[in-house]
């Protein structure tokens, strides 16, 4: 009897494993198709100065128009990284953002756009060279480009990558550390990194309006960020109460549903044209 149960479990186990492998292979195939069939798109989420209320940048966020419906990055980015397909997808993002910066410039909209960079992209020796070339080819000024690199990735940057980042910044581009507060940062490494802005992860600031310790910690972290000569950006701001606390404790810029949702290009252009300091303060 025990044996039968064991065999049953083993069969069940290998069945789930087989399903999982099949699912992963299917996703990989679909991702390849998505690249060929140009099913990716970007949406743009404003980042707003907490005092003046002006839009200081927008983060470009990837969307996949799968035949079954729109898919969010959480459902496919990990697989794209595992398979290396993120490199091709990332190239598409870079080309799209460079073209968008240039096109908006012609419309009179000078908007800094931030892109998320995956570790696999930085692994490639010529990444920064290709990035600069893509910007120049599109006639997009480097000062309107921001790179977002996660805290964990930033802590593992090689000296070569740090030098390349410094070159890009010399062109005028800016660099932000993303999801700060979710990994372990070395203060020495932080000080050595040539970055402009540090984005406080939502998990760090979610409780600031209701929990005094969370607020104190966030305030101390903002002090650290300013001590490094960087701007502090609050991510995932969902309530006016969170925005109010962040203003009081010295955060510089906020991004989140309470400010504005990620928007398609047409909506973002309308936002840019209509967004006065007063509008943003009310939002
Ligand atoms: P992230 O870079 O930390 O981006 C912020 C995420 O928070 C976005 O999710 C955004 O839609 C979401 N968000 C914004 N405001 C709020 C809010 O008030 N509350 C909550 N709960 N969420 C908010 P999204 O677009 O689903 O992207 C998820 C992650 O996928 C990003 O996190 C980033 O790590 C990755 N990602 C997105 N686009 C790209 C891309 O083009 N390339 C790469 N390599 N990764 C990307
Ligand atoms: Mg980001
Ligand atoms: Mg983030
Ligand atoms: Mg995040």
Image (spheres, rainbow, N blue to C red):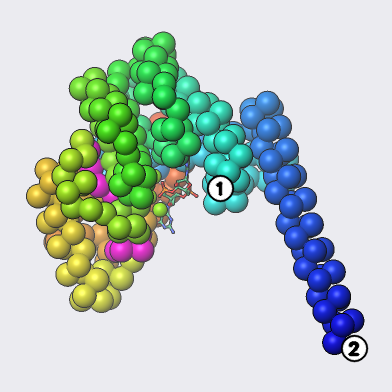
Question: If the image is split into quadrants, where does the N terminus sit?
Answer: bottom right
Mark 2 and 1 residues: CB-CB less than 8 Å, in contact? Answer: no
Q: In the current view of this chain or complex, which residue is farthest to the front?
A: 3
The local secondary structure at tag 1 comes to helix
Identify the magenta region.
195-205
Residue 196, magenta (yes or no)? yes
Residue 239, magenta (yes or no)? no
**283 lies left or right of 79:** left
**29 lies left or right of 221:** right
For this rendering, which residue is in front, 172 or 80? 80
Q: Which mark is residue 97?
A: none
Separation of marks 2 and 1 at Cα, in angstroms: 41 Å
Instruction: Indicate the position of residue 92 as horizontal and vertical percent values.
Output: 53, 26
Instruction: Indicate the position of residue 184 as horizontal and vertical percent values.
Output: 30, 58
- Of labels 2 and 1, the one closer to you: 2
The local secondary structure at tag 2 comes to loop
For this rendering, which residue is in front, 194 or 160? 160
**41 lies left or right of 281:** right
- In which quarter of the view is residue 38 placed? top right
For residue 102, say whether it is visible. Answer: no
x 68%, y 33%: residue: 32
Q: Which residue is mark 1?
A: 78
x 80%, y 64%: residue: 14
For this rendering, which residue is in front, 280 or 2? 2
Instruction: Indicate the position of residue 30 as horizontal and vertical percent values.
Output: 71, 39
- Choose the circle earlier in sequence order: 2 or 1: 2
Q: Which residue is mark 2?
A: 1
Position of residue 81 relative to residue 107, above or below, is below
Position of residue 221 relative to residue 190, above or below, is below
x 29%, y 49%: residue: 199
Position of residue 88 relative to residue 81, above or below, is above
């Amino acid at each position: 009897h025990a044996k039968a149960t064991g065999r049953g479990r083993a069969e069940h186990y290998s069945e789930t494993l087989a399903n999982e492998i099949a699912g992963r292979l299917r996703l990989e195939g679909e991702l390849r198709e998505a690249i060929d069939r140009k099913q990716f798109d970007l949406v743009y989420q404003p980042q707003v100065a907490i005092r003046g209320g002006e839009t200081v940048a927008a983060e470009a966020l990837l969307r996949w128009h799968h035949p079954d419906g729109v898919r969010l990055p959480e459902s496919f980015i990990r697989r794209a990284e595992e398979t290396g397909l993120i490199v091709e997808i990332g190239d598409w993002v870079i080309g799209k953002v460079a073209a968008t910066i240039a096109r908006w410039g012609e419309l009179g909209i000078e908007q800094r756009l931030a892109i998320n960079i995956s570790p696999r992209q930085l692994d490639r020796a010529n990444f920064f060279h290709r990035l600069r070339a893509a910007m120049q080819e599109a006639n997009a000024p480097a000062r309107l480009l921001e790179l977002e690199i996660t805290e964990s990735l930033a802590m593992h940057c090689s000296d070569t990558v740090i030098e390349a980042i410094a070159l890009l910044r010399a062109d005028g581009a800016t660099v932000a550390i993303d999801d700060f507060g979710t990994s372990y940062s070395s203060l020495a490494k932080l000080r050595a990194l040539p970055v402009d802005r540090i984005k406080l992860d939502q998990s760090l600031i979610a409780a600031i309006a209701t929990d005094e310790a969370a607020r104190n910690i966030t305030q101390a972290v903002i002090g650290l960020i300013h001590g490094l000569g960087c701007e502090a950006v609050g991510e995932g701001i969902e309530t006016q109460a969170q925005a109010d606390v962040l203003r009081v404790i010295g955060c510089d810029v906020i991004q989140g549903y309470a400010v504005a949702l990620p928007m398609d290009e047409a909506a973002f252009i309308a936002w840019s044209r209509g967004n006065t300091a007063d509008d943003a303060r009310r939002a």
